[in-house]
Image: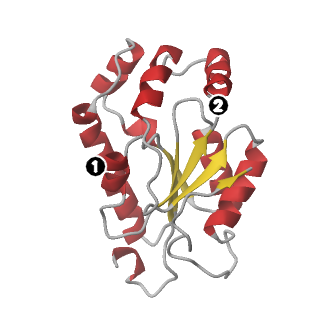
Amino acid sequence: MTGERRGARPTRHVVVMGVSGAGKTTVARGISAATGLTFAEADEFHSPENVARMRSGVPLDDATRAPWLRDIAAWIADRGAEGRSTVLACSALKRSYRDVLRQGPLPVDFVHLDGPAEVIRARLARREGHYMPASLLESQLATLEPAGPDESVLVLDLSSAPEVLVAAAVEGLGLPGPVSGGKHRARASDPTPEVLG
């Protein structure tokens, strides 16, 4: 595989997914800090046109998301080719979106931050400086497709504290420390979603 040609240990690639306000960025940054995986925020891959749509309260559709998802998948593949493991914060709401992200040469694991809509609404009401208005939450909840039994998705309760979620993700996916020689697992051993936290 591309990310394994140099004889180094296999790279790991993780997407922390969920609707806006689920805590994806906080948890993904925490995983990066705990493991040394290279962090990226998927929102930063959006085109100016997509950002303008969302600022105005217009939800993105499959057509407007497609180039964005392809760019993220290419970023994962490029980092893997460099021998770098990654962790991204990305909504990845539909099965088809997740399929795009994992269609490259490298395995991708997902951590789904799931939980009560009222908790997410309260978080969005307090959030400042983000272009995703709270009004789009309902469209995201309607778009969200839970993981199928054949997907490698670890489901965590977003109501838990960030440090609890980070620890559960690191343990649940068997992620290594930043400099340790710990064992790698190319995929979660059981692809059936598991509720933790």
**Label 2: how many Cα within 10 Å (few below 14, some 14–19, many 20+):** few
Residue at the extreme left: 63
Residue 97 position in % (x across, y down):
34, 46
Q: Residue at x 30, y 53 (%)?
A: 100
Q: Position of residue 140 (x, y in %)?
A: 44, 28
The residue sitting at 61% across, 26% down in the picture is 117
Q: Residue 110: give x, y in percent of width and height.
A: 51, 55
| Residue located at (71% from left, 57% from top) | 168
Mark 1 secondary-structure assignment: helix
| First in residue order: circle 2 vs circle 1 | 1
Residue 71 point in image, percent of width and height: 30, 48
Q: In the rendered structure, which amino acid carries the disc numbered 1?
A: Arg
Residue 5 occupies quadrant: bottom left
Q: Nearer the viewer, residue 138 or 124?
A: 138
Which residue: 68% across, 50% down? 30
Say whether marks 2 and 1 touch (CB < 8 Å): no
Number of the label disc, if any, that sits on residue 116: 2
* 22 lies above or below 90: above
Please identify the residue farthest to the front as the structure is shown: 149
Q: What residue would you read off at disc 1? A: 70
Instruction: Tell me the mark number nearer the camera, choosing from 2 and 1.
Output: 2
Q: Give the total number of marks visible in the rendering.
A: 2
Badge 2 amino acid: Pro
Residue 176 located left or right of residue 190: right
Q: Is residue 122 above or below residue 167?
A: above
**190 on left or right of 118:** left
Is 179 above or below relative to 67? below
